[in-house]
């Protein structure tokens, strides 16, 4: 009998290695009465599914495209509230679910592991969804100047209005002249199985020598990272961020230190075998 049911709420989820990663962490502690499963839920079914999810799960992660929607339905902690996006939830009996955002810790932890210091740097952010909000929050804290580019202008405008001193809205054509030191892909473009897709347009040369960070972890070498490396830049996959944010979520649910190396290896092995 599973006492503690966890899951990942999002759509689509076929790429996700969170179940493999969290299973490895739960097994490391012998937590056999815990499970972690996918909860694939299209946007137009989310509201209807939400009451049942609340009653059947102990906690969950939230991913594309629900992080902002769900933030309005839970009691967010101060960090998640400031970001306006939630990726980790603990359900409570007779009270609102508690929402946190571990994406900020995830990105911060992984940048630190790679020895990357983005303080005061000029950074282009692609995307203006929940993951982008976490990245912008962190980069504003680090004193960065940010150029935000997104398909839907209204979403980037909403973020920009929160940080008018630090964030400008841009287009791909503006990037080269702005001379960024780093570029972070927070869109889902290029994620498995659509691995040929790239958030940077084919019609424009990729800026030379930038640090390119892709929040996508499957595939590890995305079309975005390949372009950056071909333009003499450095490419970093989102695998580390996945594990850092997942480790923080594990601790929120279980109150135990996360077995980071075990989680990382589980994801790495799955990627190598897929
Ligand atoms: P998450 O919470 O993981 O960030 P999200 O809120 O759905 O997920 O955000 C996904 C991001 O990827 C958004 O910036 C989205 O652009 P829109 O705001 O225009 O929807 C971006 N995205 C997804 N598919 C895209 C595509 N085919 N082309 C360009 N951007 C895309």
Image: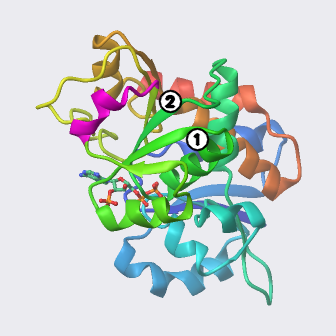
Q: Is residue 174 magenta?
A: yes
What residue occupies the far left of the structure in this picture?
203
Q: Quadrant of residue 219?
A: top left
- Residue under the image location 68 percent in, 45 percent down: 141
Q: Residue at x 84, y 41 (%)?
A: 29
Label located before the other in sequence (2 or 1) = 1
Quadrant where the image shows the C terminus: top left
Q: Is residue 220 above or below residue 170?
A: above
- For the N terminus, which image quadrant? bottom right
Q: Which residue is rendered at x = 37% and y = 71% of the image? A: 42
- Tell me the chief SS of the magenta region: helix
Q: Mark 2 = which residue?
A: 270
Q: Quadrant of ligand 1?
A: bottom left
Q: Residue at x 29, y 13 (%)?
A: 231
Q: Position of residue 154 (x, y in %)?
A: 34, 68
Q: Secondary structure at mark 2?
A: helix
Residue for badge 1: 20
Extent of the magenta region: 172-181
**Left or right for 134, reference 151:** right
Residue lying farthest top?
A: 232
Between 218 and 203, the one nearer to me in the picture = 203
Residue 246 shows up from this direction: no
| Image vertical order of residue 7 relative to residue 132, above or below | below
């Amino acid at each position: 009998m599973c006492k503690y049911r966890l899951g990942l709420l999002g759509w689509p989820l076929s790429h996700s290695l969170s179940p493999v990663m969290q299973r490895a962490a739960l097994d490391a502690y012998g937590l056999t009465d815990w499970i972690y499963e996918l909860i694939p839920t299209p946007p137009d079914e989310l509201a209807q599914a939400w009451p049942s999810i609340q009653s059947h799960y102990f906690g969950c992660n939230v991913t594309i495209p629900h992080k902002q929607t769900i933030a309005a339905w839970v009691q967010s902690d101060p960090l998640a509230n400031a970001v306006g996006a939630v990726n980790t939830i603990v359900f409570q009996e007779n009270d609102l679910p508690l929402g946190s955002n571990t994406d900020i810790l995830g990105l911060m932890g992984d940048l630190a592991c790679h020895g990357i210091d983005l303080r005061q740097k000029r950074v282009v952010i692609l995307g203006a969804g929940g993951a982008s909000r976490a990245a912008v929050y962190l980069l504003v804290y680090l004193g960065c100047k940010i150029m935000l580019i997104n398909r839907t202008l209204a979403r980037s405008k909403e973020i920009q209005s929160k940080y008018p001193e630090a964030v400008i809205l841009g287009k791909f054509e503006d990037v080269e002249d702005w001379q960024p030191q780093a570029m972070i892909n927070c869109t889902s473009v290029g994620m498995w199985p659509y691995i040929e897709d790239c958030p940077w347009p084919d019609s424009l040369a990729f800026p030379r020598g930038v640090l390119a960070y892709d929040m996508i972890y499957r595939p590890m070498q995305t079309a975005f990272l390949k372009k950056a490396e071909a333009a003499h830049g450095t490419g970093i996959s989102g695998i580390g961020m996945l594990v850092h944010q997942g480790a923080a979520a594990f601790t929120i649910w279980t109150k135990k230190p996360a077995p980071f190396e075990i989680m990382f290896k589980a994801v790495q092995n799955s990627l190598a075998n897929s």
